Amino acid sequence: MNIETNQSSENNRSNVDSSSTKKMADLSEGSERDTDITTKQLISDESEVVLSKRQRKKIIKHQKWLERKDEMRKNRKQRRKEEKMRKNEKREATGEPPLKIYKMCSEQASKVKVAIDCDYDDLMTEKDIRQFVKQIQRSYSENRRSPTPLQFYLCSLGGKTLGKIEECVQGYKNWDVYLKPEKVGEVFENDRIVYLTSDSPNVLETLEADKAYIIGGLVDHNHHKGLCYQRAVKAGFNHAQLPISEYIQLQSRKVLTINHVFEILVRYVQSNDWKEAFIKTIPQRKGVSEAIDANPCTVTSINNDSLAKEGTSIDSEPDDINQGTLIASIGCELKSEASTVTTVEVPVEEKSANTKL
């Protein structure tokens, strides 16, 4: 009897030990399984490389942004609404007329066609594409506020650019813009296209209604220098640069953002004045100043018979001038890198051989 009791107790003890051992094994397997799952989450399926700390932070930051995207959009919309109300109240107080929105089909709208070529999104990063979409929005806003809006096109619209527009811009399909998935050469005739690029040797003189002026939609921070010009030449398009050097001087490069180029074209159509369009649009941080003549030190001789000689030196003898005045225009460089023009009127005696200032 005692023997049987001892045996049963030993069997129970052994069963308890085996069950506890099995549970411990299951727990260890479960922890290993969880560890494997966590490890797999940090490993890429294709490259099997563990994500760095910076990459994990970016993923977490993007996830938080997605969660707060709708809320931030509502806040931005509310801020814009409040800002619009403040501006309207200010205009009413000062007696200014309210801002109007103009459409491309209106009678006063311009016939000049301007298109942004969106066929560069494969060369831009996610950040660059986001900036590109913002510049498109600014261009559209400027066109809507212009009393003579341009015929605005977005060509080659697709891929990452279209995806970012759909993500960030609600109601873009209702824009007063021609949205074209086709390439520039398919939307316009080749001989009507003028591709705007600062690398072109040609200078744009004016805007013609039967032409289509193309702005390259590339935000690359000068990583692909001359690419727009190369594509225009390869496609056989006409190309030209804006006449910046003829009207103003810049202390930086002549490369402008997409929305600045578009605004310049809008302002030129309004005023028909390149100089005014440049000064009002180009930011002052680029060091904008009026262009100066290359050779200002000249003398112009004028008499009553409207006889003029340009480029005459000050010490030269004027021929066939009996009456009138000698006007000497002398360009002087100052230390501030500006130039002034001094006008001196000297009476010319009838029998004098030389004129001295």
Image (cartoon, rainbow, N blue to C red):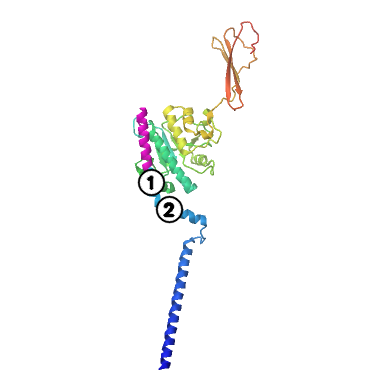
State the CA–CA distance, disc 2 to disc 1: 14 Å
Quarter of the image that includes the C terminus: top right
Rendered residue at 48%/45% (across/down): 128
Q: Secondary structure at mark 1?
A: helix
Q: Which residues are magenta?
A: 77-99
Q: Is residue 188 above or below residue 65?
A: above
Which residue lies at the image location 45% right of the left edge and 45% below the top edge? 130
Q: Nearer the viewer, residue 105 or 13?
A: 13
Where is residue 7? Give x, y as percent: 43, 90
- What SS does tag 2 mark? helix
User: Which three-letter amino acid code belongs to the residue tagged 2?
Assistant: Lys
Of the numbered discs in the image, which one, if any, rests on residue 64?
2
Q: How far across and how far down the image is residue 330, in percent?
A: 60, 19
In the picture, the disc for residue 73 is: 1
In the picture, which quadrant includes the N terminus?
Answer: bottom left
Residue 132: percent from left, percent from top: 45, 43
First along the sequence among labels 2 and 1: 2
Q: Residue at x 42, y 93 (%)?
A: 2
Crowd band around label 2 with a 10 angstrom C-alpha radius: few (<14), some (14–19), many (20+): few
Given contact means CB atoms under 8 Å apart, are the residues at marks 2 and 1 in contact? Answer: no
Q: Give amino acid for label 1.
A: Arg
Q: Quadrant of residue 63?
A: bottom left
The quadrant in which residue 155 appears is: top left
Query: Which residue is at a point 44% across and 35% down the rendered structure image?
Result: 262
Number of marks drawn: 2
Q: Is residue 129 left or right of residue 333?
A: left
Residue pushed farthest front?
A: 2
